[in-house]
Image (cartoon, helix red, strand yellow):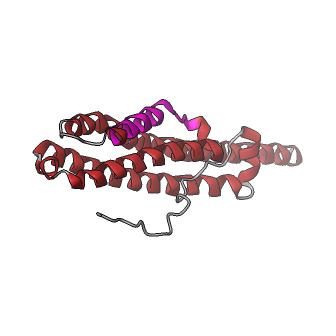
């Protein structure tokens, strides 16, 4: 009787262990999805601020229309590209998303640098408030991206470690992509007000 119970109890233990591992991976994947949602929220916050910033800047006489158009176009591209939690397994999809967001950041930077030529605009309280909100949002984006990478690292480590990797491969869990530094980010930007 004891010999018959031993294999059955071993199978039960293995099944319970597998269920526990799977549930742990589900919890970690949900943490990754939640962290991603926070990243998206900050990107949306930035996108929502841009029309107000552009409209405030448009009021400045002789402001460079090309700069405003670049910001508007970059915002349009950034808001049209969606990255679902399922797509976080694809490093290329995250890289493409990051590239579009970086183009928007670059266009905004050029806008804010060109504002230096317009003292009346720099003195405008609405513009200063929007600029401060935008700077705060850029900081929030950086923080949330870092938090996302931390949670994704924890998940990815679990998915790759043996014996959890066995359950992960059987149940379809895949490593999540990371945000990475942009090419050339190691070089300090050259700012000139000539």
Above/below status of 174 relative to 179:
above
State the residue in front, 52 or 153.
Answer: 52
Residue at left offset 18%, top offset 39%:
61
State the residue in front, 80 or 179.
Answer: 80
State the residue in front, 26 or 89.
Answer: 89
Q: Position of residue 170 (x, y in %)?
A: 76, 41
Q: Position of residue 18 (x, y in %)?
A: 71, 45
Residue at left offset 42%, top offset 65%:
189
In the image, taking residue 3 as reference, residue 142 lies left or right, namely left
In the image, taking residue 159 as reference, residue 121 lies left or right, namely left
Residue 150, can we see it? yes
Dividing the picture into quarters, in which one does residue 160 lie? bottom right
Residue at left offset 30%, top offset 38%:
50
Q: Position of residue 173 (x, y in %)?
A: 68, 42
Residue at left offset 29%, top offset 33%:
51
Locate the C terminus and report the quarter of the image it occupies: bottom left
State the residue in front, 51 or 169.
Answer: 51
Q: Is residue 135 magenta?
A: no
- The count of marks equals 0
Q: Is residue 79 magenta?
A: yes
The residue segment tinted magenta is 67-85
Locate the N terminus and report the quarter of the image it occupies: top right
In the image, taking residue 90 as reference, residue 146 lies left or right, namely left
Q: Position of residue 177 (x, y in %)?
A: 61, 49
Q: Principal SS element in the magenta part?
A: helix
Above/below status of 127 relative to 113:
above
Residue 23, can we see it? no
């Amino acid at each position: 009787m004891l010999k018959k119970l031993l294999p059955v109890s071993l199978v039960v233990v293995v099944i319970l262990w597998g269920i526990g591992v799977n549930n742990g991976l589900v919890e970690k994947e949900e943490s990754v999805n939640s962290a991603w949602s926070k990243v998206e929220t900050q990107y949306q916050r930035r996108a929502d601020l841009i029309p107000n910033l552009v409209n405030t800047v448009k009021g400045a006489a002789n402001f460079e229309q090309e700069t405003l158009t670049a910001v508007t176009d970059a915002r349009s591209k950034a808001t049209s590209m969606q990255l679902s939690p399922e797509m976080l397994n694809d490093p290329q999809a995250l890289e493409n998303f990051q590239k579009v967001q970086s183009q928007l950041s670059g266009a905004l930077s050029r806008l804010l640098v060109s504002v230096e030529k317009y003292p009346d605009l720099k003195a405008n309280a609405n513009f200063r408030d929007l600029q401060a909100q935008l700077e705060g949002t850029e900081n929030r984006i950086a923080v949330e991206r870092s938090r996302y990478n931390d949670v994704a690292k924890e998940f990815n480590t679990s998915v790759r470690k043996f014996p959890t990797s066995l359950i992960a491969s059987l149940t379809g869990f895949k490593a999540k992509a990371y945000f990475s530094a942009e090419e050339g980010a190691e070089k300090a930007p050259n700012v000139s007000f000539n």
